[in-house]
Image: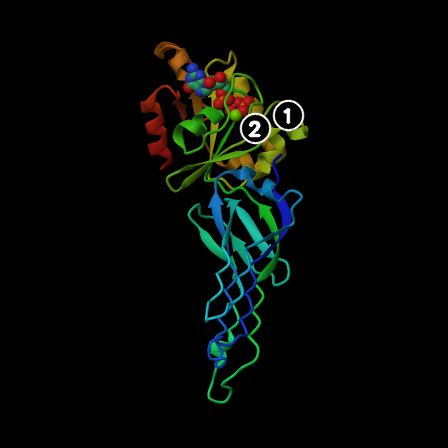
Amino acid sequence: MFIDEVEVTFQAGNGAPGKASFYPKYKSGPDGGDGGSGGNIYINVTSDLTTLSQFMGVKFRRAEDGQPGGKLRKTGRRGRDSTFILPLGSILTDQNTGELFELNDINQKILLCKGGHGGRGTYNLRSPSNTTPLAGEPGEPGQKRNLKIVLKLIADYGLIGLPNAGKSSLLNAITSANVKVANYPFTTLEPNLGVMGTKVLADIPGLIEGASAGKGLGIKFLKHIEKVNLLLHCISVESDNLASDYKIVREELRKFNPQLIKKSEIILLTKSDVITNEQMEKKQNILQKHGKVYPISILDDKSLSNLVKLLG
Ligand SMILES: Nc1nc2c(ncn2[C@@H]2O[C@H](COP(=O)(O)OP(=O)(O)OP(=O)(O)O)[C@@H](O)[C@H]2O)c(=O)[nH]1
Ligand SMILES: [Mg+2]
C-alpha cells in the first residue's frame, strides 16, 4: 500500500546515570564511572517510495539508552544509534516546535534526535570542595520529536502514458530502479522513482480514458507529477491508433489540471524494436505535429543513451 502521510514519534536514547561507588580495597576515594550517552537517531534517504509503510501500526521509534557507569571508573557503554530510511520527497514537521526537515537529496543524512549525555560518576564529580560525592549524576533524556511526515514526490521528469506502454521498463533501463514490468495493463499500482545521476524520474500507473473521473489508478497519483519539469509521454508502436492514444492521455491530464498540459513534453515511441525503420517513419509522422518524437527501445542501447543525454 502506498502511504504518503504518517505521524510518528522518534526518541533518541537516554543518557545513563553515573555510578556512586568507592574503591573497595582502601574503602576510600570515589571510583564511580560515568554513564554512557544515549544513541542518536539519524535519517537517510531512499528513492523507494514504499518505505513509509514501516510506520504502519508502530507510532513510536527509538534509539538505545546508554548503560550506567560502573565501579572502578568504568564508563557505561554508549547506546547504539538508530538510522531510519525515508523516501525522497518526505517533509518532516516537528509538531511541537514547527521545525521542518525536507528530504530533497538522495545523499542527505540528518541527525534528527540527539541522544542524552550520560551523567558523571562519583570519580569525575570529585572536587576540592567535595572530595567524596555520595551520588552519581542522572543522565539527560534523549531528544524526542513528534513528527508528521508527508510525502511529496519530487521528480525532474515524469513518465506518463497508457497502461502497458513500457513506462516502467524505461525507468528500469535508464535509472537505478528495479520495478515490476509485465505484459498486461496496470502492472504498476503505485508510483516509482528512479535516480539517474542527480536527476529523478517518476513512473506513475498507466492512465486510461476516464482517469480524471476516477477510472483506473493513475489519477490518484497525477498530483505527484505537478512539479516535474518535463513529461515523457510514452506511446507504444504496437498501438493501432497512435493519435488517439496520445489524445486520451492529454485529455485526462487537462481535465485533472490544465497546468499539466502546459508543461514541456516529449513523445517517446516505445518498443521501436518490434517494427521496421520504414514503419517507424510513418508512425513518427503521425505524432510529429504534437511535438518532438523519439523512437526508443529498451533493447536498443543507442536510443537509451541518446535519451539519457537529452535529459542530462
Ligand atoms: N519489445 C519490447 N518490449 C518492451 C519494451 N519496453 C517494454 N516492453 C514490454 O512491454 C510490456 C509492458 O511494459 P511495462 O514497462 O510494464 O509497461 P508500463 O507502461 O509500465 O505498464 P503499466 O504499469 O501497466 O502502466 C512488458 O511486457 C515489457 O517487457 C521495448 O522496448 N521493446
Ligand atoms: Mg508500469
| x and y, in percent, of residue 22 in the image | 51, 77
Q: Picture quarter containing residue 55?
A: top right
Q: Mark 1 points at which residue?
A: 216
Amino acid of disc 1:
Gly
Are the residues tagged 2 and 1 within 8 Å (C-beta)?
yes
Residue visible at 47% across and 55% down?
110
| x and y, in percent, of residue 266 in the image | 44, 29
The scheme the figure's colours follow is rainbow
Tell me the number on the disc at residue 205: 2
In three-dimensional space, the C-alpha distance between marks 2 and 1, rounded to whole angstroms, equals 9 Å
- Of callouts 2 and 1, which one flags the residue occurring earlier in the amino acid sequence? 2
Please tell me whether residue 240 is drawn above or below residue 154 in the rendered image: above
Residue 300 seen by the camera: yes
Give left or right: position of 296 versus 168: left
Q: Is mark 2 within 8 Å of ligand 1?
A: yes
Determine the secondary structure under disc 1.
loop
Please tell me whether residue 193 is drawn above or below residue 246 in the rendered image: below
| x and y, in percent, of residue 310 in the image | 35, 33
Give left or right: position of 54 versus 46: right
Residue 271 seen by the camera: no
Quadrant assignment for the N terminus? top right
Please tell me whether residue 181 is drawn above or below residue 148 in the rendered image: above
Determine the secondary structure under disc 2.
loop
Looking at this rendering, what residue extends furthest in the bottom direction? 129
| x and y, in percent, of residue 280 in the image | 39, 14
